[in-house]
Amino acid sequence: MKISVVVPAYNEANRIPPTLERIVSYLRERHPDYEVIVVDDGSNDSTREIVQRQFDGTSQVEVVSYGGNRGKGYAIRYGMSRARGDLVVFSDADLSTPIEEIEKMLPLMEQGYDIVIGSRAHAQADIREHQPLYRELGGKLFNFMVRLVVMPDLHDTQCGFKLFRRAATLPILPHLRIDGFAFDVEILALARAAGLRIAEVPVVWINSRTSKVRMSAASRAYLDLLGIRLRARRMQAEHNAAGRPHPAPPQ
């Protein structure tokens, strides 16, 4: 089974070399049928050139770009649409969740889930370095609002480590609109509305002190939740009208 890893990158010249080295080293040993797609989201530093030099001659690692800074959500959609693996994982460039955590997710895919997301809110999550208090509280508030407005059963939609079954997820991508902070909520909500099965697993997480998330961007995400809820309801209605029942979660 081929695994694709999509890494969105915006001005990551300093952080991305060790991240890619760790990802590639792990995949070579554990999952040799792999590819890594670095999506350069309009960087104005040397991110693209550094990746190309680092893996020159390595066909399983490529860097793609589209010009301009479109946002993390757009970058991930762009990378996922070009992935060729049976399974696609997206990972933040800071590798706050180690790539090795995918081993917790693969058995759930074998059980029949379509999406498995890493969770920092799970009781068994291993948070080895916390975010600053204001970020942690802000994240908890946002996840509370996600449960209240969109998906009551998911406790951490924003962890930057998620695994998708490519064939099941591709039909969802053309319906996605959000490029900013709430893109995680959107893809999960629409996937759920289309009948895909989602599992949440505890992961190791180590805060990156050079996080690029801006609180202003996170604030705009609250407004996006209402739009996501409406579009998810429309998609679920269409799904039901087409006579496609929602499958029960795997046992």
Image (cartoon, rainbow, N blue to C red):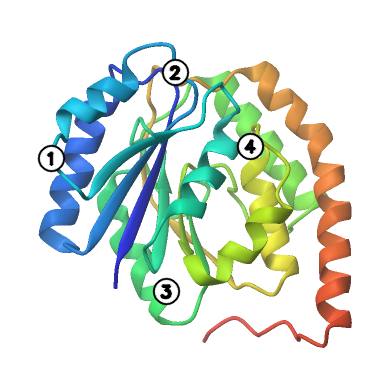
Q: Which residue is mark 4?
A: 140
Residue 108 is labelled as 3
Who is closer to the viewer here, 177 or 130? 177
The span from disc 2 to disc 3 (Cα, nearest Å) is 35 Å
Residue 241 percent across, percent down from the top left: 89, 81
Q: Is residue 232 above or below residue 142?
A: below
Residue at 56%, 22% in the rendered image? 69
Q: Badge 4 local density, few (<14 within 10 Å), some, or many (20+)?
A: some
Who is closer to the viewer here, 202 or 197? 197
The span from disc 3 to disc 4 (Cα, nearest Å) is 26 Å
What is the secondary structure assignment of the residue under circle 3? helix
CB contact under 8 Å: marks 4 and 2: no
Residue 251 percent across, percent down from the top left: 52, 86
The span from disc 4 to disc 1 (Cα, nearest Å) is 43 Å
Residue 82 is labelled as none
With 4 as the anchor, is 169 left or right in this view?
A: right
Q: Which residue is mark 2?
A: 43
What is the secondary structure assignment of the residue under circle 1? loop
Please tell me whether mark 3 or mark 4 is closer to you in this view.
3
Residue 57 is labelled as 1
Residue at 80%, 42% in the rendered image? 225
Who is closer to the viewer here, 109 or 28? 28
Please tell me whether mark 4 or mark 2 is closer to you in this view.
2
Residue 153 in view: no
What is the secondary structure assignment of the residue under circle 4? helix
The span from disc 3 to disc 1 (Cα, nearest Å) is 34 Å
Residue at 28%, 27% in the rendered image? 16
With 73 as the anchor, is 113 left or right in this view?
A: left
The span from disc 1 to disc 2 (Cα, nearest Å) is 23 Å
